Image (tube, rainbow, N blue to C red):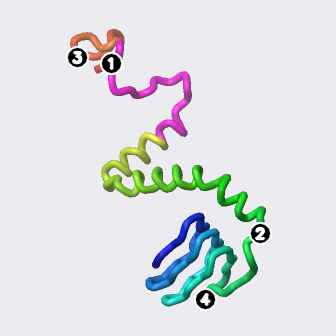
Amino acid sequence: ATLGDAVVVGAGSQILDGAVVGSNVFVEAGSIVTPGTKIPDGEVWSGSPAKFLRKVTKEDIEYIQSHSAQMSSLALLHAGECENDYKQLAKDEEEYEDKEHRADDYWQPTDEDPTDIQGQGSPGRIF
């Protein structure tokens, strides 16, 4: 598939092989753009299979421009999360669960314990 500039592809939408999507186009959520479909510039498409719905309005273009930076940063974050292996995901989930259930006034795990004495632990703690 080929996507032009300033294209918004809604959640769960699929742009299949061979489809060409022009610039300033909205493909609404859940839509399926079938192989070989050519979507001209400045149109909104919706459905399964996707069909022309209406022309893009001035408000639509303003939305694309105002949200493009945020969407780009979310895409980079998503790509970084997808690079993690299952061990890192399990560790992240464990840390998240621990933070959710541990009271703030209870001992918090850290990488380094500032009260650790020569690698023997903190005075007064049971080893």
Alpha carbons under labels 4 and 3: distance apart: 64 Å
Mark toward the viewer: 3 or 1: 3
Apparent side of residue 19 relative to residue 25 in the rendered image (left or right): left
Measuring from the top left, give residue 90's x and y in whole percent: 37, 50
Camera-nearest label, 1 or 2: 2
Q: Which mark is residue 49?
A: 4
Mark 4: few/some/many CA within 10 Å (<14, 14-19, 20+)? few
Label 2 residue SS: loop
Residue occupied by mark 3: 119
Residue beneath the point at 38% across and 26% down: 110
Sequence-first disc among 1 and 2: 2
List the residue tagged with mark 1. 126
Residue at 42% across / 44% down in the picture? 94
Considering the whole magenta stretch, tell me its main secondary structure.
loop
Kind of residue at badge 3: Gly
Q: Give the residues in magenta.
A: 97-114
Percent coordinates x, y for residue 28 in the rendering: 66, 74
Could you tell which of marks 4 and 3 lies nearer the N-terminus? 4
Above or below, 19 relative to 59: below
The reply to whether the C-beta atoms of the residues labelled 4 and 1 are less than 8 Å apart is: no
Residue wearing tag 2: 57
**Distance of mark 3 from mark 1, alpha carbons?**
14 Å
Q: Residue at x 66, y 60 (%)?
A: 64
Q: CA distance from mark 2 to mark 4?
A: 23 Å
Structural distance between the alpha carbons of marks 4 and 1: 65 Å
The amino acid beneath tag 2 is: Thr
